[in-house]
Each structure stands twice: as structure tokens, then as C-alpha cells.
Image: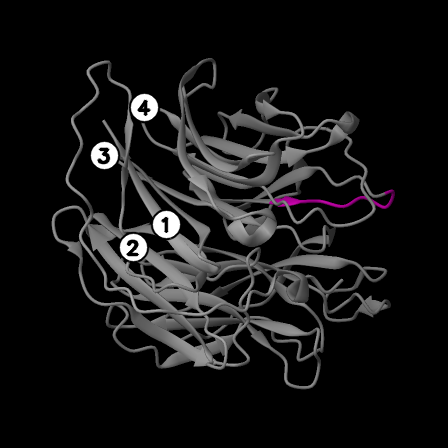
Amino acid sequence: MNTRAAFALVLALSALTGCKRDAQPPKPANGDYAVQTWVLPAEAGSVAPDLATAPGGRVLLGWINRREGRRNALQFASYTDETGWQSQPRTIAVGNALVANAADTPHLLATPDGAMWVQWLQAQPDDAAGYDVVLARSRDGGMRWEQITRVNGDGIEAEHGFASLWPDGADALGIAWLDGRAQGGGEDESHGHHAAGAMQLRANRFDMSLQRGADAVVDARVCDCCQTAVAMTTRGPLLAYRDRSDDEIRDVAVARLENGVWRAPKTVHADGWKVDSCPVAGPALAAAGNAAVVLWYSEAGGKPALRLARSADAGDSFAAPVAVEEGEQVLGRAAVGIDARQVWVAWLRERPQGQTLMLARYAPDLSKKLQQLEVATLGARGMASGYPKLAVDAGGAWLVWTDVVDGAAHLKGARVTR
């Protein structure tokens, strides 16, 4: 598969300065949450956003700045409610080999030692379809990015991507990614798996000096180009991904890293969705304590659906899923978050009149939908709207998505509070 060409966006950039968010709207009298505009510092033409919370109440926004005739630039900015945007956007990496992809976006992470980490895709010079997962670390909160390495150490011209990051202690990082080194067929001699040309799900650990551990093969046969997701539970990081059976059943599975060992993967729900090509629709995942929620898209039974399931035991088992939405208007691009009061779900809906970004809140046990609202109406169509990103904190939720205005991509944001 060569999904990168399908999703590459060549768009013009124009200047846009970073702003503090708009004033708070009146609080709803009924206890519901309300949406307000969150003005972002990304220039026009920016794509592939990422959103993460960090210590100190910070929100990290990352994106790729792409302009025709110019090299791609990976950038980020930091925000707090008290001070707004803390600086102008900072550039992490620049280059024509830096891959801009709506489905396989960069990821940011801040660890307790004050360091920042970022992952992105880098094209391989001798293979038009090949690319590597690149990891960088900044010791000074993002001012300088002098430590860089390739996550996949195979040196094989193949596809590697769709990574997920998690903190491993105070100053190290865990990372999982899709690895195509075995897709040419044969045996992966380093681990003894007969992959029969399958995409693998691998994971590793990098310390503060970017020294790598030993790769673990979490699953030797997974869907080729669906996003992975990870969340921290009290029993260790829980990893969600779209599995792939020998007869092309591509249901969502989870695996947990516990005491340094990856537990055997388990299917979240036996949808039985059989599809011969990758749907480019990976699961979303969030956790708090031992509670974990997985959100995923399925067309099992011929009906598009967005499904949400909860685990009370850190992913050992999941209750029967609830249907967030069903029907042809449902797109397989969604995000999920969790806090002490609720579970948040964001998704894109497409109707003849255009796309809308939806948001819903559920009771912690998913027994009741607390609220549903329309966040935005989009000018983008099809894959131009990318994949929305969601982060939650004690005050509510943050949302970022891609829209198209006057033919150019723009990142849009919203803050959802009481």
C-alpha cells in the first residue's frame, strides 16, 4: 500500500500570528458545556495537527506547515488558560523529506523531567514509497531539538508509521508503530516470526539519551494503515489498534504492557468486519485509573457505525459497545477523552450540505448520553478535513481540526467549557 501519496496535501501558506483565546462566553445555566473559538497560531496552509496536555496545565499543539515551493516545517506551540499562547510557533524540523500526511500525523509528548518529545515521518531517499519513524527530544522544553534518531532500526526500504507515544517513568519514552519490514515476505530472523508479508505492530523504549531498547513485536499481523492509540492505566500503557486476521477480519484489539511484558492482544468487540483493503480508520483510546474507553469505526453488517466500549479493568475485558452514531453520514475519523465526570467523543459527520464536527458527553459508565452539540460546520470535503484531535482537562475539552478556507487549509480550534 502507498497511502502517503493519497493523503499528501500541497497547500499555500500565509502569515497568521498567535493569539490568546477569545473571552469566555456566559456559562450555561443548565450545567451543559458550551463551545467557544480557540484561535490558533498556525499559519494558513498548516495540516496534520496533534494535541496533547502537559504538566503545569499546558496544552501542546503540533502541526506541519506546508507551502508550495517551500520545504515542509514541523512546528509546535504551547498554551495555558492563564497566559494564552506562551510564545510564537517554534520549528522542530524542516525538509522536503518530512512527510505531511492527514492520516499519519506527528505526535508530541512532555515527560515529568521537563523534556519534550516529538515523532514524525521521514521519507527514505532511495524509495519513493518508503519512510521511517523519526523521534526527537528537547531537553529545554522545545527551544532546541538536538537529539534525533530513527525509531525503526531495520534499515529496510519499507513503510513505518502510525506511531503512539507514552511516558516511561520520569525521563524515558515508550513508542509503538506499524512496521512494514516483513511485507516482502519471508521470516523476520530477529524475532523468528513468520509474518507472510504482513504489517507488524512493534514497540520499544528510548531513554533520555535516545538509546533504544529491544524491539517487541506486539502483533505480527495488523491492518496496514490504521492509526494506533495508547493511554496510561494504573496497570501500565494500554495500546489499541486495528487487527487483521488471515481471512481479512479487521476488528479492533488492545494489548497492555505490564511489568515490561506485552500481554496477549484481546479483541475489544467481535464486530466481524471483513474488508479487503485498509479503511484508514484506527481506534481512539483514553484511560483514567483502571477505566479505559475505546472508540472505533466499523462497517460490520454493511452499516457504517461509530462504537464506544468501556473497560473497568485496564483493558482485560470490555462491556458491550454503545452506538455513538450509525448511518452513511458517519466518517471513520474520531477522537475520545475521559475525565472524572464524563467521557468525551468527537467525530466528523458528512451530509450532502457539508461536513460537521460533532461532540458528545457520556456518563463515565456510558449508561447515558449527557449532551450532544455541533462544534463547527466545515468548508472542507472528503479527506481535506483530516482527523480531529481532542484533549481534556479539569476545565473541559480542547478540539483541533483542519478546515479549508478560500482553497487553503486552516487549523481551527475550540474550547468547550461550562
Q: Quarter-wise, where is residue 190 in the image?
A: bottom right
Question: Mark 1 or mark 4, which has the lower sequence index?
Answer: 4
Q: Amino acid at mark 1?
A: Lys
- Write the residue at 57% across / 47% down: 381
| Mark 4 secondary-structure assignment | loop
Q: Amino acid at mark 4?
A: Arg
Colour treatment of the image: one colour
User: How far separated are the C-alphas under marks 2 and 4?
Assistant: 27 Å
User: How far separated are the C-alphas under marks 1 and 2?
Assistant: 7 Å
Is residue 262 on the magenta stretch? no
| Mark 3 secondary-structure assignment | loop
Picture quarter with the N terminus: bottom right
Residue for badge 3: 395
Q: Amino acid at mark 3?
A: Gly
Query: Residue 246, position in %: x, y?
Result: 86, 46
Is residue 243 on the magenta stretch? yes
Residue closest to the eye, 262 or 352: 352
User: How far separated are the C-alphas under marks 3 and 2?
Assistant: 19 Å
User: How far separated are the C-alphas under marks 1 and 3?
Assistant: 20 Å
Residue for badge 4: 341
| Mark 2 secondary-structure assignment | loop
Residue 381 higher or lower than 193, as above or below: above
Q: Dot 4, how many residues are within 10 Å of its Cα: few (below 14), some (14-19), or many (20+)?
A: few
Query: Residue 342, position in %: x, y?
Result: 36, 24
What is the span of residues highlighted in magenta in the rendered image? 241-247
Q: Amino acid at mark 2?
A: Leu
Residue closest to the eye, 124 or 405: 405
Residue for badge 1: 412
Residue for badge 2: 40
